Amino acid sequence: MYDKIIFELSENGRRGYTLPQLTFPEKPIEDILPDKFLRKEPPILPEVSESEVMRHFIQLSNKNYHLDKGLYPLGSCTMKYNPKVNENTSRLEGFEAIHPHQEDEDVQGALQLMYELSGALCEISGMKAVTLQPAAGAHGELTGMMMVHAYHEKQGRPRKKVLLPDSAHGTNPASSVISGYQAVQIKSNSDGLIDLNRLKENLDEDVAALMVTNPNTLGLFESHIGEIKELLNEVGALLYMDGANLNALLGIVRPGDLGVDVMHFNLHKTFSTPHGGGGPGSGPVGVSERLVPFLPVPRIEKRGDEFHLNSDYPDSIGKVQAFYGNFSVMVKAFTYIRMLGSKGLKRVSRNAILNANYLLEKVKSAYELPYPRRPMHEFVLSGDRQKKNGVKTLDIAKRLLDLGFHAPTVYFPLIVHEALMVEPTETESRQTLNAFAEALLQVAAEAEENQDILKNAPVTTPVGRLNEALAARQLQVKWAPEL
């Protein structure tokens, strides 16, 4: 029954909700809306009871894989479990019912929360100041690179290019190009780190910045970051850090102490607010002292015991999003930080690193490990061994669905053939990690013994393997009735 869509459950005259009678004279709709906005025919809507609505959507949610259902080991995504207390605080009436057009004096609690969240992020990262406006990580990157551009313009020495490791996130070169720079790739060395010789070859006074992720997308810490910063200083270039992997550093390393000039945070990753299909993101940006004048406006300032918005900063790059940013996400992140405290945040990263290394030890005998160094919060395997038997990484990912697990990130980073990028996060138990390791080992064994099982997977999901190229070209997400 519940394999049917909701329109197929519909019966004429069935109701799930009854509106109360109006207590004031009803005006003709034509007196309220212009005729051009009025329907000529009533909309086609399903007629179902409340219980059918509930059962229908619960069934749909059960068909979808989500964090409340199980492990979500997407590398570089930090898909940790989101505590429900975060949702509770974000729905407090004093936060949920306010409007961004209210006067400063009417929203002191919200302004105070954002002010204190900015301060907490500064303390965690070692940066001088933070803007909360950007809506997500890529937006934060763009905001950061816009400030880099404004800084060099103010210095009277515009630059032409930005350097990026070949393991960089795809958004890094995009943010650089949109900001007016040429993106120049720097090859990794045999250890999976930035090749210092290649970096030196490309460094000159046309370089605006180096964008680095640390730990990088192989889960490895860029141990030469101090030397890299010195090389950048010699040509007047800035150091940008992609904060996607900050979950490995909390309470252990502060990027500002390493010389980072600008970095973005992912509140929806590191600080446990839902993302993807689960909710909006938030990508605050932290800066060092020399980039503070260029932060977006308005900024929240504390004057005595009151908080105010101030846009009077002539060197600012301006506003990068309507109002202050995705406020409900900020409430959730603030709750997470305050509940854990400094010791708790450090425990988060230590456990994330422990979980990743524990899982790697369990499975590395069955897969290629292209960079066999001790990782931090995530690691990257290669399916090259399985591909020799005709099994692709995509087949491995699809088979894991049949075994009850979401797949890791696949085919990224691009410097690893048939990549499987695994990040278990700190919120998974040893029992869950053991079960996932057993699934990965089972798939590796099947790749040796019965490749057809993997090539035909998945078979237990609501739909089988899709033609993804065709789906991208002929996307159909709307149901239309037969008239």
Image: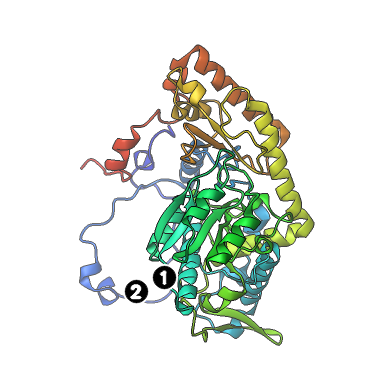
Q: Is residue 104 above or below residue 38?
A: below
- Closer to the camera in the image, 211 or 311: 211
Name the residue carrying label 1: 22
Under mark 2, the amino acid is Glu
Q: Residue at x 46, y 36 (%)?
A: 411
Under mark 1, the amino acid is Leu
Question: Badge 1 local density, few (<14 within 10 Å), some, or many (20+)?
Answer: few
Q: Residue at x 57, y 41 (%)?
A: 192
- Closer to the camera in the image, 160 or 458: 160
- Closer to the camera in the image, 380 or 166: 166
Q: How many marks?
A: 2
Q: Is residue 307 left or right of residue 45?
A: right
- Can residue 431 be seen? yes
* Percent coordinates x, y for residue 185 in the rendering: 44, 50
Q: Are marks 1 and 2 in contact (CB under 8 Å)?
A: yes
* Percent coordinates x, y for residue 96 in the rendering: 57, 68
Name the residue carrying label 2: 26
Q: Is residue 134 left or right of residue 27?
A: right
* Percent coordinates x, y for residue 291 in the rendering: 56, 74
